[in-house]
């Protein structure tokens, strides 16, 4: 874990007990939204990488067929 990540956790650890329930709910929703978005971006990255490999393989196959 990076130093910045440690500072973030320490800061939230100190402040969360002092927050109202409304603000805790807001913070939880915000965090869950960030996690959801990060998951979507990761899936899209994996899809793009996989698609790129497939396109590369198809291009290589086309080259091989042309040589025949």
Image (spheres, grey):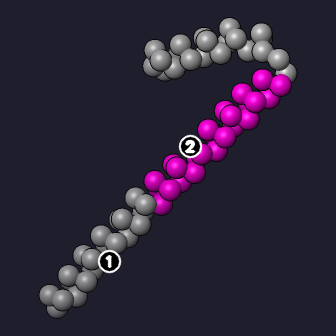
Question: Residue at horizontal 35%, vertical 65%?
Answer: 53
Instruction: Answer with left or right where residue 38 lies relative to residue 60.
Output: right
Reply yes or no: does residue 34 show up in magenta. Answer: yes
Q: Residue at x 64, y 44 (%)?
A: 36
- Give the position of the C terminus as an image quadrant: bottom left
Question: Toward the viewer: 65 or 41?
Answer: 41
Quick check: is 3 in the magenta stretch? Answer: no
Q: Give the residues drawn in magenta, as a range.
A: 22-47
Q: Within 10 Å of the Cα at label 2, are there few (<14), some (14-19), or many (20+) other Cα atoms?
A: few
* Image side of residue 18 versus residue 51, left or right: right
Task: Give the mark nearest the N terminus, 1 or 2.
Answer: 2
Residue matched to label 2: 38
Q: Residue at x 78, y 15 (%)?
A: 19
Is residue 40 rendered to the left or right of residue 68?
Answer: right
Q: Position of residue 50 (x, y in %)?
A: 42, 62
* Disc 1/disc 2 C-alpha distance (Å): 30 Å
Q: Vertical placement of 24 versus 56: above or below?
A: above
Q: Secondary structure at mark 1?
A: helix
Q: Which residue does the numbered mark 1 point to in the structure image?
A: 58
Asked if the residue at tag 2 contacts the one at tag 1, i.e. Cβ–Cβ closer than 8 Å, the answer is: no
Position of residue 67 measured from the top left corner of the image (x, y, whole percent): 14, 87
Q: Which is closer to the viewer, label 1 or label 2?
A: 2
Q: Pinpoint residue 60: horizontal percent, then vertical percent.
A: 24, 76
Residue ranking furthest to the bottom: 68
Name the secondary structure under disc 2: helix
Up the image or down, 14 lies above or below 56; here it is above
Residue 20 sits in quarter:
top right
Give the quadrant of residue 27.
top right
Q: In this view, which residue lies farthest toward the right? A: 21
| Pick the front one: 25 or 55 | 25
């Amino acid at each position: 874990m990076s130093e910045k990540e440690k500072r973030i956790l320490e800061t939230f650890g100190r402040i969360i007990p002092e927050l109202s329930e409304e603000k805790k709910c807001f913070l939880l929703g915000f965090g869950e939204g960030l996690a959801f978005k990060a998951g979507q971006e990761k899936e899209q990255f994996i899809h793009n990488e996989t698609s790129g490999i497939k396109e590369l393989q198809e291009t290589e196959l086309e080259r091989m067929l042309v040589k025949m």
